Amino acid sequence: NAGVTQTPKFRILKIGQSMTLQCAQDMNHNYMYWYRQDPGMGLKLIYYSVGAGITDKGEVPNGYNVSRSTTEDFPLRLELAAPSQTSVYFCASTPRLSSYEQYFGPGTRLTVT
Amino acid sequence: DQQVKQNSPSLSVQEGRISILNCDYTNSMFDYFLWYKKYPAEGPTFLISISSIKDKNEDGRFTVFLNKSAKHLSLHIVPSQPGDSAVYFCAASVRDSNYQLIWGAGTKLIIKP
């Protein structure tokens, strides 16, 4: 059981470039989440999904897009990267309807210059 | 507007003594509170939680106390061990929010030998 995996671990983007952050979980969890963490701050929810084909915006969705075509995968797309998107990105999943506990991947550190 | 606040960015405690981490919240609709622990270059891991209908939850060396009238919760670690050195995040959720979590900024706990 690999849990929640994220790729890449690190990435440097130039302003205006695009990229996809990958997230996969092998625990058959319905709920998946994308967060960003800026230095000295808590995690902020970008997007979440309650199941394949269903996604919704979180607190800070601007500049990002998501899709959920399978239970396992929840990629996060950055279009036209900006320096304000420099952050550490975490993907998480939660197993069942009554659980608040979220399981996290190791994160992707993204720098936009 | 920070709904979940951890006012101490860092805390230093002698090994073997009690560590007390604090968290304040403003949203009276929160019905579940969680503590997560985070090591550098890793994702957060779930530590302990408490429902708003309780005032205490204990798990081994970790106890969480909830004071609803003061909108305050605390995490007690006793005795503190070197492996407890990490950043601790407080998070809260509102019922029927698809388990979205609102996070505090974290407190870095340093256990001195």
Image (cartoon, coloured by chain):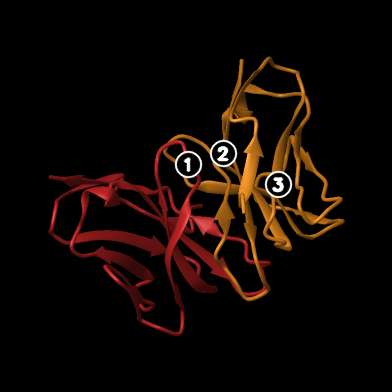
Supply the letter of whichever chain is orange: A
Crowding near the residue tagged with mark 3, few <14, some 14–19, many ≥20 C-alpha atoms within 10 Å:
many
Q: Is residue A64 left or right of residue A11?
A: right
* Marked residue chain, label 2: A
Quadrant containing the C terminus of chain A in the rendered view: top right
**Residue beneath label 2, please?**
A107
Q: Report crowding for label 1: few under 14, some 14 to 19, many 20 or more residues within 10 A (C-alpha).
A: some
Q: Which residue is found at the position 71% from the left and 46% from the top?
A: A24
Residue type of the residue flagged with mark 1: Glu
Between the C-alphas of marks 1 and 2, the distance is: 7 Å
Visual hue assigned to chain B: red
Residue A23 pos. (x, y %): 69, 43
Q: Is residue B108 among what the camera can see?
A: no
Q: What residue type is labelled 2?
A: Gly
Residue at 38%, 71% in the rendered image: B71
Comparing marks 3 and 2, which lies closer to the viewer?
Answer: 3
Residue B69: name its quadrant: bottom left
Q: Do the residues labelled 1 and 2 touch (CB within 8 Å)?
A: yes
The circle on residue A24 is 3
Alpha carbon distance from label 1 to label 3:
16 Å
Count of labels in the image: 3
- Secondary element type, mark 1: loop
Residue sticking out furthest to the bottom: B53
